[in-house]
Amino acid sequence: MKLIIAIVNNDDSAVVSSSLTTTGFYTTKLSTTGGFLQTGNTTLLIGAQDDEVEKVITVIKDHSSTRIKEVPTSASFGRGISAADVKAKTHVSGATIFVLNVEEFVKL
C-alpha cells in the first residue's frame, strides 16, 4: 500500500478531489501554503494499492494546470526601490506528488 501526498493549487483542488472520488479514491484535504510563492495550496492525502498509484497520478495530472506566476525578487536596487516592487515571472507546476510506502494501515 502507498500513501500519496499531492500538493495542488487551490484553483484546481475541487476538480482534482472530485475526479479522484469519482474514480474510486478517497482523499483527506489539508489547507497549506507554499514557502516560495506564499500562496494557498491544497494538500491531498490519498491511500492506494501499489498497482493503483499510476492511476491516481494520471487523474491528478489530467486535472491540474501549470501556471505562470509573478513573484517578488530578492534583488537590492538601492534607495527608494523595494525588492517587493520588482516582480519576476516563474513557471508553477500543476501538482507536486510524493509516494510513500505504508507499513501498516488501520481503519477503525
Image: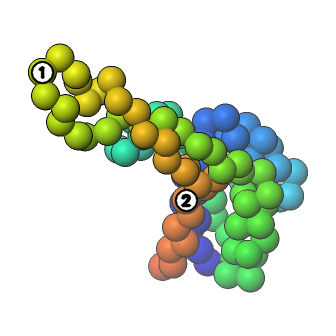
Asked if the residue at tag 2 contacts the one at tag 1, i.e. Cβ–Cβ closer than 8 Å, the answer is no
Q: Type of residue at label 2?
A: Thr
Quadrant in the picture for the N terminus? bottom right
Classify mark 1: helix, strand or loop: loop
**Relative height, residue 70 to residue 36 (above, below):** above
Residue 87 appears left or right of 58: left
At which x and y percent is residue 104? 50, 75
Colour basis: rainbow
The residue lying at 30 percent from left, 27 percent from top is 84
Residue 55 appears left or right of 46: right
Residue 24 appears left or right of 88: right
Classify mark 2: helix, strand or loop: strand
The residue lying at 48 percent from left, 35 percent from top is 70
Q: Is residue 104 visible?
A: no
The residue lying at 33 percent from left, 23 percent from top is 85
Q: Is residue 66 visible?
A: yes
Quadrant in the picture for the C terminus? bottom right
Q: How many marks?
A: 2
Real-space CA distance between mark 1 and mark 2, rounded to the nearest whole angstrom: 38 Å
- Residue beneath disc 2: 96
Residue 45 found in image quarter: bottom right
Residue 29 appears left or right of 84: right
Residue 68 found in image quarter: top right
- Residue beneath disc 1: 79
View extreme (right): residue = 22
**Relative height, residue 35 to residue 6 (above, below):** above
* Mark positioned earlier in the residue sequence (1 or 2): 1
**Relative height, residue 100 to residue 88 (above, below):** below
Q: Residues within 10 Å of mark 2 (few under 14, many from 20)?
A: few
